[in-house]
Amino acid sequence: MAAWTNAAVHAPLFNDDYLKQLALKVFDIDPRMLQLPELNYTSDAATEALFRHCMATSDWQSGDDHLAMEQVTNTILVSMLQNMGITKLTAPIKGGLSPKVTTLVCDYMQANFHRQIYLAELADLAQLSEYHFCRMFKSSMAQTPQAYLLAIRIEQVKFRIKANKNSAAEIALQCGFSNQSHMGRYFKKLVGISPRQYRNLVTG
């Protein structure tokens, strides 16, 4: 699904899973209840104006504007979901984990992010085989258990960097990464900048 575009503005592409995760975080809407239209190009004057004002002149390759661009990007996507993308299904939800099991598993990962978590542990909590657990978790959360755990760890890294009390190597071990390099690789993949660049931005 493409965001918006016209002759002068070209937007990045965002897949269904990313948009469903955003809807889950912002609107607390079960991803299974979302039906997103197949749009390659669409037009929305308010969204285009927001893009032009806040993002079109920014340097996407620079880390200096990254946090602001991330915030504006999600603002634009939320606006799109509100105005164009969200339709709730009237049919009963099928597949996925029950709300109780989803909460149990997610809380478990939140509490144990600092150590290695095995898929068998999570499957046992859900009383499912590992194969079926993975499928049902992704159906409920629009991402794999591994991706969900990684996102938790990266948020914890960001929190600790903002506190500015520990070295990068210490933070890596505290947040479940094997070493600083391991943390830095995934941090840059998810956040777009290195932990050092992020520290410089948030601590001045």
Image: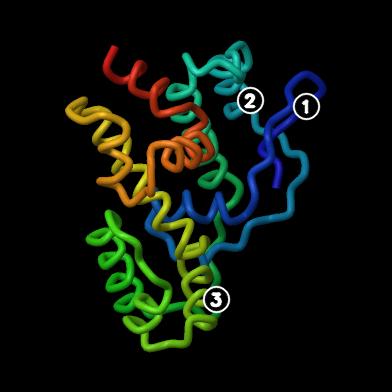
Residue 92 in view, yes or no = no
Residue positioned 33% across, 51% down in the render: 176
The residue to which callout 2 is attached is: 48
Question: How far, Cα to Cα, is label 2 from label 1?
Answer: 9 Å
Q: Is residue 76 above or below residue 142?
A: above
Label 1 sits on residue: 6
Quadrant placement of the C terminus: top left
Amino acid type shown at disc 2:
Glu
Q: Identify the mark nearer the N-term, 2 or 3.
A: 2
What is the three-letter code of the residue carrying label 3? Arg
Task: State the count of labels.
Answer: 3
> On screen, 183 above or below 199?
below
Asked which secondary structure carries label 1, the reply is loop
Mark 3: give few (<14), some (14-19) or many (20+) Cα within 10 Å: some
Label 2 or label 1, whichever comes before in sequence order: 1
Element type at mark 3 = helix
Colour setting? rainbow
Q: Which residue is mark 3?
A: 135
Name the residue type under label 1: Asn
Q: Position of residue 128 (x, y in %)?
A: 43, 87
> Which of the marked residues, 1 or 3, is nearer the chain's N terminus?
1
Q: Residue at x 53, y 56 (%)?
A: 20
* Labelled pair 2, 1 in contact (Cβ < 8 Å): yes
Judging depth in this view, the residue of 65 and 82 nearest the camera is 65
